Amino acid sequence: MTTARRKSRVRENRSGDTSFVTVVGGANIDIHGKSTRALRANDSNPGTVCISAGGVARNIAENLVRLGVDCRLITAVGDDHNGRTLVRLASEAGIDTQYVQEITSAQTSTYLSVIDTSGDMAVAIADMDIIDQLTPARLRPCQSMLRQSSLIVLDTNLPDSTLAWLAREFAEQMLFVDTVSTAKAPRIKRHLGSIHTLKTSAIEAEALTGLKAETRSHLQDIASQLHAAGVERVFVTRGSRGVFYSTGDEQGIFKLSRKNRIIRNAGGAGDAFLAGLVYSWLENHDLEKTLRIALTAADLTLSDTAPSSPALSLTAINQTLEARDGS
């Protein structure tokens, strides 16, 4: 496999200093309830509850740090206990939090999900109104830093005006985007021409393009639409059915051998996958190695109850791949 390149990959920023990645988007307190039996609607279900730091952008940032990437996070938190907790945990994880915006008298985002016995999300509620405070006016003081970034990752939790501003102001930089959810994926539609790499799920791709994503032919149609709009690389995650990828030059479905895979929480797997894409791009890996790393990062995260697994590392990824190759 080879990867088409529109822009050169860099390990130094424009001032020649050590490179870093900036991630912009959501951070929240995650509350995950997992049932120990088949979920029963309109009833109290026995199970376990886990509270942790979460949010797509924050998860990606932590995963990148675990992969050895210097990472800065731009998000919004309230001046409350949860906000202080999120910033503290992010700092302890090694994320540069100096650009996190504290919003006075606002409530920090909370994400509540119910997980079924298979580890998949049954339903979730995202209370993330505070992210609407990440306006262009709040981000302009970060503009110089953003221009120094080797790569910028965005999630579609951001308000429309902010996505438009970022896509316009940083169109010449490497932009990676996560579409987050079916409700928020369409927010990026008008800005596809600025995106280098788009990571989405099958249902999010349907919401973004208005096309079905059930068969390989459907996925090829989706990729054609996205490439025509200007996206260089498309990755559609499909759970156990693997990942559909398209670079314009190459298309296909990639799967890893997954013997004895344990799924405890599927919530953060996509965030780990995107972190793997970012890391692999910075390391100049070819497409096959990129997919192997990204999917292995997702698998390691699936086996943890937290959305960002402490077990994720380059060593763990390499050991897992070596074990698979030797089996």
Image: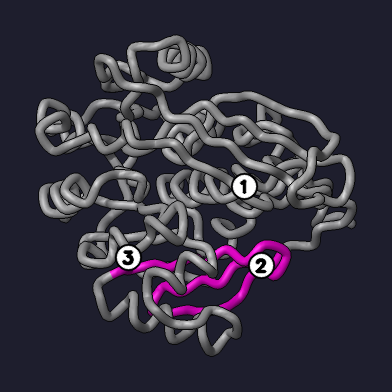
Residue 313 in view here = no
Q: State the CA–CA distance, disc 1 to disc 3.
A: 26 Å
The quarter of the picture where the C terminus appears is bottom right
Q: Residue at x 32, y 31 (%)?
A: 130
Q: State the CA–CA distance, disc 3 to disc 2.
A: 24 Å
User: Along the horizontal axis of the image, is 261 left or right of 217?
Assistant: right
**Quick one: label 2, few (<14), some, or many (20+) residues within 10 Å?**
some
| Residue 250 part of the magenta segment | yes
Which quadrant of the view contains residue 100?
Answer: top left
Count the marks: 3
Kind of residue at disc 3: Arg
Magenta stretch, residue numbers:
231-255
Query: Percent position (x, y) of residue 152?
Result: 30, 43
Residue 244 in view here = yes
Circle 3 SS class: loop
Sequence-earlier tag: 2 or 1: 2
Q: Residue at x 29, y 60 (%)?
A: 188
User: Along the horizontal axis of the image, is 246 left or right of 238?
Assistant: left
Q: Is 219 situated above or below 19?
A: below
Kind of residue at disc 1: Ala
State which mark lies toward you, 3 or 2.
Answer: 2
Query: Between 143 and 27, which is closer to the camera in this rendering?
Result: 27
Q: Do labels 3 and 2 touch, CB within 8 Å? A: no
Kind of residue at disc 2: Gly
Circle 2 SS class: loop
User: Along the horizontal axis of the image, is 94 left or right of 143?
Assistant: right
Sequence-earlier tag: 3 or 2: 3
Per the image, the residue denoted by label 3 is: 5
